[in-house]
């Protein structure tokens, strides 16, 4: 079965609707969770990640000069989001091996400090499974580059075991990034004076120190 198979496409839509609507809340456990896991197992290899945009020589989404990769697909859909078009999982173009090669090639240039992954929502399950492959390559081929990620989910609630966006590769992603900017964008808390984030509830988390100490360590960049 290929990714162009209509049944696979319908299955992908069903899974994303389940994720978006939180259907397991309306189904008795463990049946609800089992259904979601079964559907995920059946079709997850047939879901590709799309990219909305790649920005080179970027200085707005982290320290130094960066390559910023905007993935597509977001179920948070925050009011006031500056890129609502990226909510659609099908927005942009498919993430391919050629795309990955371009990112690695561009990032290898000496003036780049690192990579930033944002969106959309990088921690949607289908996105995580592609992002971890890119992270592996960066750690192997460009170990001196740092990695920032943005998420509308909350690190210590949603990205830990039992959280709504915790899957088999979440810990591996979190163990291999340097900074996580977490939290939904809240329009009422918007503050243009903040470093590298849009609303006052969002946090810039030093992931290296956080993972070592087992409690959240905020970056000095928080203001």
Image (cartoon, rainbow, N blue to C red):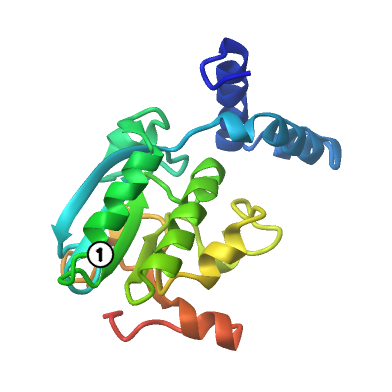
Q: Secondary structure at mark 1?
A: loop
Q: Is residue 126 above or below residue 117?
A: above
Q: Position of residue 212 (x, y in %)?
A: 57, 86
Looking at the image, how many numbered discs can be counted on the residues? 1
Q: Position of residue 203 (x, y in %)?
A: 38, 71
Residue 182 shows in the view? yes
Q: Position of residue 142 (x, y in %)?
A: 35, 69
Query: In the displayed image of the protein, which residue is found farthest to the top?
Result: 6
Image-quadrant location for residue 39: top right
Q: Position of residue 111 (x, y in %)?
A: 15, 71
Report crowding for label 1: few under 14, some 14 to 19, many 20 or more residues within 10 A (C-alpha): some
Q: Is residue 101 above or below residue 67?
A: above
Residue on which the image places disc 1: 108
Viewer-side residue, 40 vs 31: 40
Q: Residue at x 27, y 48 (%)?
A: 102
Image-quadrant location for residue 171: bottom right
- The quarter of the picture where the C terminus appears is bottom left
Q: Is residue 136 above or below residue 20?
A: below
Residue 216 shows in the view? no
Residue 85 left/right relative to 94: left
Q: Residue at x 58, y 29 (%)?
A: 46
- The quarter of the picture where the N terminus appears is top right
Q: Residue at x 69, y 62 (%)?
A: 161
Viewer-side residue, 197 vs 138: 138
Viewer-side residue, 190 vs 212: 212
Residue 45 left/right relative to 26: left
């Amino acid at each position: 079965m290929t990714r162009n198979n209509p049944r696979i496409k319908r299955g992908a839509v069903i899974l994303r609707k389940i994720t978006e609507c939180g259907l397991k809340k309306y189904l008795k456990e463990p049946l609800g969770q089992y259904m979601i896991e079964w559907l995920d197992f059946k079709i997850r290899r047939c879901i590709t990640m799309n990219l909305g945009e790649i920005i080179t020589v970027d200085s707005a989404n982290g320290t130094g000069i960066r390559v910023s990769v905007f993935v597509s697909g977001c179920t948070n859909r925050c009011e006031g989001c500056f890129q609502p078009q990226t909510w659609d999982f099908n927005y942009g173009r498919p993430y391919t091996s050629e795309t990955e090669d371009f990112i690695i090639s561009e990032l290898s240039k000496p003036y780049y400090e690192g990579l930033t992954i944002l969106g959309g929502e990088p921690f949607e399950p289908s996105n995580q499974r592609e992002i971890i492959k890119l992270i592996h390559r960066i750690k192997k081929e460009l170990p001196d580059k740092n990695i920032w990620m943005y998420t509308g989910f909350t690190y210590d609630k949603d990205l830990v075991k039992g959280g709504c966006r915790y899957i088999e590769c979440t810990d591996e992603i979190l163990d291999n990034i340097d900074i996580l900017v977490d939290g939904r964008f809240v329009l009422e808390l918007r503050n243009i004076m903040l470093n590298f984030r849009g609303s006052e509830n969002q946090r810039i988390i030093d992931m290296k120190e956080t993972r070592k100490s087992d409690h959240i360590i905020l970056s000095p960049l928080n203001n």
